[in-house]
Amino acid sequence: MKITQVVCQILRIPQIIAKTASSQDAVLVRVRTDSGLEGVGEADSSPEVVKAIIDAPFSHNIACGLRQILVGQNPLESERLWQEMWRRTMYFGRSSVAITAMAAVDMALWDLKGKHFREPIHRLLGGKRFDRIPAYASILFGRDGRETAEIGRRWIGAGYRAVKFGWEPMGQSEANDIDLVRGARQGVGDDATLLIDAGCVWDARTALARARAFADFRIGWLEEPLLPDDVEGYVWLRDRSPVPIAAGEEECGRAAFRPLIDRRALDVYQVDLSRNGFTDACYVRSRVEEIGARLCNHCYTSPLTVAASLHWLSTCRDAFLFEDCVEDSPLRHELTHEKVQAVDGWIAVPDGPGLGVTLDEDFVARHLVSQSS
């Protein structure tokens, strides 16, 4: 079996709003073979930049577009292909968006591999430990504490036992920050798990002050209080914080996670399959489990990444929570024929071949804004 085509498609919903939500557009990578099988993946990144990395022609041996590398190769050799993509993009890659493009390809290769062997990806990764995982509703803050409380009540009413609020308008002032978290706790009630995502807004000392203030509201973790590259800050903060510290969604690949793991900088390491792929996510899984920390997925995109995240997280030793994006976006809910969403606070792990989800081609056609192959 050989790869014959690598198709890159960009989808976008009609109305783009200025908010931190990556469910408003999508970049799909479709790897096709001479056997007729196709694998599908996506990246949580800038779609047009990912497309450029896939489409780029050969420049020289370590500056090459991904399609040039992949066509003619055996798609089942995903580990070797990951290493070849990394090596042959070394002059413009090694981190960030190049790794996200590789992650989309890697997801597609694993989807294809599962379809070839007629097995779900979690079985190919070594076997799932869980059939279903408790899910938290992941949503942005309201404009203030009162609106945030209303949002919390909505999702508790929908059956979730955990809710995470994130990003803007957190970070404008101490009073505003505490108002948001107070409102969040009021909305979800006393018994639910409350998670707070600051969105990279503070220095370490301010983050520690907020962690101490938020501890009164019994938050389950404080996520991304610092800039992603402030490893020393995270080490300092985690040693002093009264609440668990979580981060990792910006990290692309094993090299990005390695300093955080080596320094034991976090309590919860959040891995996005659409920014790491299965190949490097499995490396991160092993390393984090070795140091006794916890793993969670990050996912704010389409059902493709939700399914991929479920396959991966179900193989982790301590799959204690799953991030379930509840943004009201058609890309989150309508891209696949299968609805991959929590029911009564639990989300089921797909058991179909590969990712276990299938694209709705009519939806793709209606939202397609760019394609290359």
Image (cartoon, grey):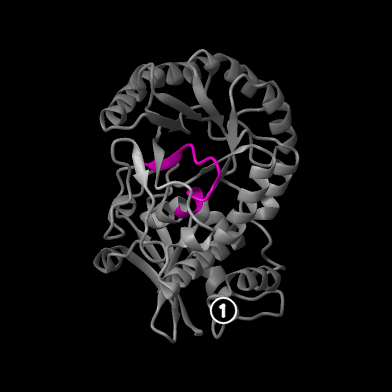
Where residue 322 sits in the image (x, y, percent)? 44, 41
Total marks drawn? 1
Where residue 108 sits in the image (x, y, percent)? 47, 68
Q: Nearer the viewer, residue 162 or 170?
A: 162
Where residue 329 sits in the image (x, y, percent)? 31, 48
Q: Is residue 14 magenta?
A: no
Query: Can residue 19 be seen from the camera position used here?
Result: no
Up-down relation of residue 342 to residue 104 (above or below): above
Q: Name which residue lies at 70% across and 54% down.
A: 255
Which image quadrant for residue 367?
Answer: bottom left
Q: Is residue 124 left or right of residue 267?
A: left
Query: Can residue 269 be seen from the camera position used here?
Result: yes
Can you say which quadrant of the picture contains the C terminus? bottom left
Q: Is residue 322 magenta?
A: yes
At numbered mark 1, what does the secondary structure look like: helix, strand or loop?
helix
Where residue 292 sits in the image (x, y, percent)? 66, 37
Q: Name which residue lies at 42% across and 62% down.
A: 120
**The magenta segment:** 311-325
Up-down relation of residue 290 to residue 60 (above or below): above
Residue type (three-letter) at the residue carrying disc 1: Leu
Tell me the residue that label 1 is attached to: 70
Q: Is residue 184 left or right of residue 312?
A: left
Q: How many C-alpha atoms fall within 10 Å of the one at disc 1: few (<14), some, or many (≥20)?
A: many
Q: Is residue 74 left or right of residue 25?
A: right
Which image quadrant for residue 302?
Answer: bottom left
Q: Name which residue lies at 56% across and 14% down.
A: 213
